[in-house]
Amino acid sequence: MKRFLKTRLFNLFSKEAYEIMKTKIIITAIIIMIIILGFNVTSLKINKQNDGDWPVELIGVSNISVSKSQFESWVETYEACWSDGDHTWCGVPVWRVAAMVDDPEPEDDSFNEELAAEGYIVKLTSWDGWVTELQISDVAHNDNGYIIANTIDGEELPEFTPRDRASYPLHLRGEDVFSPNTVGGIIKIELVGIGSNNPPEIPEIGGPSNGKTGTSHTYYFSTSDPEENNVYYYIEWGDDSNSDWYGPYTSGNEKSLSHTWASDGKYNIRIKAKDTFNEESDWNSLEVTMPKYKFSNILQVFRIVKIL
């Protein structure tokens, strides 16, 4: 009996010791792998599969599917660099890229001054859906203000910036680039407005049709632009106040604004939209009521009548 118990206890402790030993071995192996491979959060982000890659579509009077080597050859000829204080970004000025498709003959690098004088938009689209639009009048002959960069500190762009923003394959940088015009992960560059341009559709608007004074009410609105230009909204709240032009926003995306009315009464909300060429839609409207008699007061009246 004693022998049986000793054997049983030995087996139990042996199994427990084995599990502890196995766990220690696994943890040690993981630590060794981390040390050898040098993994960190940043490297994991950079090494994940690229969603945006070459070629980059360049669309204008003519169209080009730009390969990586092709863009690098443009950099050799027209390289421009800019430092943000921490890093140096190098690539091709935006206007030089636009020149590649602003004539019927693709990759004719002479800049079409006449077309630029008429005005158009350089539209940059990221693989993550972000869109930035630049007026050609702002970027023309502006070498350091607006650069389509393909390198940072002499190295190929990472897929993501340290703030988890798309970067590879191309990134808009420069001394005149500020939010919301920053965009990385560029996979398409278009010259928009070089032909006919149409205004956005009449915006749709939705939200509560009644409420109470002193309370914030939220209204939702959206519109689409035929040329998919970015859009701005202008809202009149019916109480002599307005939103001013609100945007820019991507065509088709729903946005919202809130408003508080100070006095009871009926108000007519009016909304219109415009695109980046200042083509304006017609107005849409929604009537709202801030009632003088709140529902709780009406119930109180009924209670008094019933008592009488």
Image (cartoon, grey):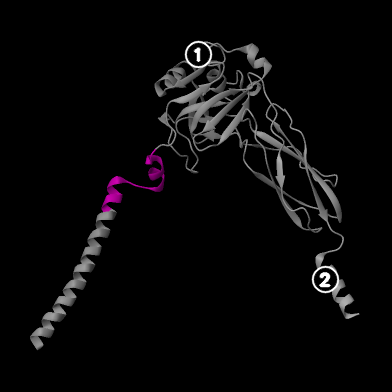
| Span highlighted in magenta in the image | 32-49
State whether residue 67 is above or below residue 26.
above
Q: Position of residue 224 (x, y in %)?
A: 65, 35
Read off the residue under disc 1. 106
Where residue 127 appears, as percent x and y from the top left, is 49, 35
> In the rendered structure, does residue 36 fall within the stretch colored magenta?
yes
Q: Mark 1, mark 2: which one is toward the viewer?
A: 2
Any part of residue 176 in sight: no
Question: Residue at label 2?
Answer: 299
Q: Quadrant of the C terminus?
A: bottom right
**Identity, as a three-letter code, of the amino acid under mark 1:** Pro
* Crowdedness near tag 1: few (<14), some (14–19) or many (≥20) residues, C-alpha within 10 Å: some
Q: In this orientation, does residue 282 appear?
A: yes
Q: Amino acid at mark 2?
A: Leu
Q: Residue drawn 28% across and 54% down?
A: 30
| Depth check, front residue: 304 or 98 | 304
Q: Position of residue 307 (x, y in %)?
A: 88, 80
Q: How many marks?
A: 2
What is the quadrant of residue 160 in the picture? top left
Residue 250 lies in quadrant: top right
Q: Is residue 142 left or right of residue 269?
A: left
Q: Is residue 215 left or right of residue 248?
A: right
Between 101 and 174, the residue placed more toward the observer is 101
| Residue at horizontal 46 percent and vertical 26 percent from the top | 56
Sequence order check, earlier mark of 1 and 2: 1
Magenta span has 175?
no
